[in-house]
């Protein structure tokens, strides 16, 4: 049995973008169809297509939303503020580890210095997602 990180890297090797690789590796836990998640996450790779927010982090945020969201405002308590807070905390952890959360910075577009390669960003995002999910089970 492979780890989530290994599964995500295998997806990336098969042509998934960074967001798809991370998000799709958690589909089973949430009962989400992988093909559907693949479609949802497609526009978030390559830093949302403009080398902005790292795609691996976008995939992580999708999973945080799946875990934290009430799923329907009609159900009462709004969860979006709490979801934003949790996503921000884990994005900041990633940035502390890697020097940025922006794809263009991680790839060294302006500096010529690569801070983190895509497979490593994927591994880090998967690890942080697992850390987040574990922290929610403890509550």
Image: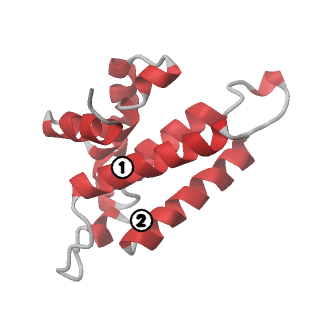
Q: Which residue is mark 2?
A: 101
Residue 138 in the figure: left or right of residue 65: right
Question: SS of the residue at dot 1?
Answer: helix
Residue 1 in the figure: left or right of residue 77: left
Count of labels shown?
2
Q: Nearer the viewer, residue 1 or 121?
A: 1
From the top left corner, tell me how far across and down residue 78 is, in percent: 79, 37
Q: Residue 25 — which label?
A: none
The crowd level at tag 1 (other Cα within 10 Å; few <14, some 14-19, many 20+) is: many
Coloring scheme used: secondary structure
Residue positioned most to the right:
76
Marks 2 and 1 sit apart, C-alpha to C-alpha, by 10 Å
The crowd level at tag 2 (other Cα within 10 Å; few <14, some 14-19, many 20+) is: many
**Considering the image in quadrants, where does the C terminus appear?**
top right
Using the rendered view, name the quadrant where residue 2 is placed.
Answer: top left
Q: Which residue is mark 1?
A: 56
Q: At x 62% / y 45%, what residue is drawn?
A: 135
From the top left corner, tell me how far across and down residue 89 is, in percent: 60, 60
Q: Nearer the viewer, residue 47 or 120?
A: 120
Report whether residue 16 is seen.
Answer: no
Q: Is residue 40 above or below residue 132?
A: above
Question: SS of the residue at dot 2?
Answer: loop
Q: At x 23% / y 68%, what residue is drawn?
A: 107
Mark closer to the chain start, 2 or 1: 1
Report whether residue 39 is seen.
Answer: yes
Using the rendered view, name the quadrant where residue 12 is placed.
Answer: top left
Residue 7 in the figure: left or right of residue 79: left
Q: Nearer the viewer, residue 44 or 132?
A: 132
Using the rendered view, name the quadrant where residue 112 is placed.
Answer: bottom left
**Considering the image in quadrants, where does the N terminus appear?**
top left
Q: Nearer the viewer, residue 28 or 66?
A: 28
From the top left corner, tell me how far across and down residue 117 is, in percent: 21, 61
């Amino acid at each position: 049995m492979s780890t989530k990180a290994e599964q995500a890297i295998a997806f990336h090797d098969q042509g998934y973008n960074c967001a798809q690789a991370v998000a799709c590796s958690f589909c089973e836990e949430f009962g989400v169809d992988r093909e559907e998640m693949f479609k949802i996450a497609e526009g978030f790779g390559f830093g949302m297509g403009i080398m902005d927010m790292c795609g691996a982090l976008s995939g992580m945020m999708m999973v945080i939303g799946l875990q934290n969201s009430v799923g329907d405002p009609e159900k009462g308590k709004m969860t979006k503020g709490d979801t934003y807070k949790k996503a921000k905390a884990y994005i900041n952890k990633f940035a502390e580890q890697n020097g940025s959360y922006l794809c263009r910075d991680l790839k060294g577009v302006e500096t010529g210095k690569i801070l983190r390669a895509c497979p490593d960003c994927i591994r880090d995002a998967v690890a942080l997602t697992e850390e987040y999910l574990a922290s929610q089970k403890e509550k």
